[in-house]
Amino acid sequence: MNAAPVQAAPVDAAGTGGASADSLLTLSAVSRQFGGLKVLQDVNLDIPRGGVFGLIGPNGAGKTTVFNLITGLLSTTSGTIHFDGRDLTGRKPYQITRGGIARTFQNIRIFKEMSLLENVIVGMDAQLGYGPLGWLVGTGAFRREEQRARERAHELLGWVKLEHRAGDMADELSYGEQRKLELARALATNPKLLLLDEPVAGMNSNEKLDLMQQIRSIAARGYTIFMIEHDMRFVMGLCEQIAVLNFGRVIARGGPEQIRNNPEVIEAYLGREDEEPGDGQTGARGAGA
Ligand SMILES: Nc1ncnc2c1ncn2[C@@H]1O[C@H](COP(=O)(O)OP(=O)(O)OP(=O)(O)O)[C@@H](O)[C@H]1O
Ligand SMILES: [Mg+2]
């Protein structure tokens, strides 16, 4: 095992207290219990504005729960979450989406009986300016909005290299393509922050390489990306900063090299050779939420 010195920032210094000026999302002393089960304990995290931030950790560490708290699907037992200067406590998921946070799910959620284009347009609902009356009477304003929505949907499908399939039904896509469609649909809400829960799960290596390029170019357009992923090569290749969750606690945070060489991180992955953070392999996956 590599015994290189560890330079990852001490966990407690990673994001304590309020949001710093350049952080987009801040979790302060966040805990979540399910009955007697402490799934997250005193989690401090701040996600800087811009770039790609990774969250890794063994199965059941609490990673998806972090996303469920950020998006309002769950509430914190204690602690606060601030996004873009605002406290998210008590906000409903749709309010959080409108506020600028979008996500994809560990288990893909798309409308399989709809076309790719329709799937992306549905994701735009919160953004469309016309009311129900416009839809009923087919006003010019409605038609112009609809045209804009279609153009934007084509553009977003282009970002994930699916534009040529815009008219196909979503269930005709491969598993990897469905993940990309979900990404395009998440972008349709025009988010500032994009949460991706295991975006390459089920993809072959070519699809992973493609997606890595596409996520890079999405980040280059100014979106902030916060990604949970078990595939270490993908995480290490894409993220500037990575936090490691183990049994509900953040045990390390730093750049890919620091994380790869952190003994506590290596220890957290021990006993599962295939999941060791330095070996570039895909780790074990659970069913998850
Ligand atoms: N709604 C819930 N009710 C009860 N327990 C839950 C709930 N959601 C998650 N848990 C439990 O919390 C723990 C963490 O789950 P979570 O899905 O956050 O893990 P994860 O790090 O995403 O794991 P994986 O890598 O397998 O997806 C698990 O023990 C899980 O069973
Ligand atoms: Mg999960």
Image: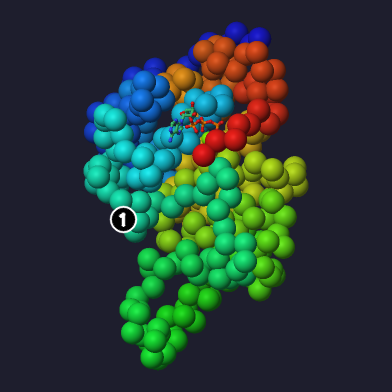
Residue 272 location, quadrant = top right
Residue 35: where, in percent of width, then height? 36, 25
Badge 1 residue CB within 8 Å of ligand 1: no
Element class at badge 1: helix
Where's residue 115, x and y in %? 62, 70
Residue 282 to residue 225: above or below: above
The picture quadrant where one finds residue 17 is top left
User: For the residue marked with disc 1, what is the amino acid?
Assistant: Gln
Pointer 1 local density, CA inside 10 Å: few below 14, some 14–19, many at least 20: some
Where is residue 210? Give x, y as percent. 69, 50
Q: What residue is at 47 percent from the left and 49 percent from the top?
A: 103
Q: How is the image coloured?
A: rainbow
Q: Is residue 210 above or below residue 47?
A: below
The answer to whether residue 41 is visible is yes
Q: Residue at x 41, y 25 (%)?
A: 39
- The residue shown at (47%, 45%) is 195
Q: Is residue 163 visible?
A: no
Q: Quadrant of residue 9?
A: top left
Measuring from the top left, give residue 134's x and y in whole percent: 36, 85
Q: Residue at x 39, y 17 (%)?
A: 10
Residue position for label 1: 95
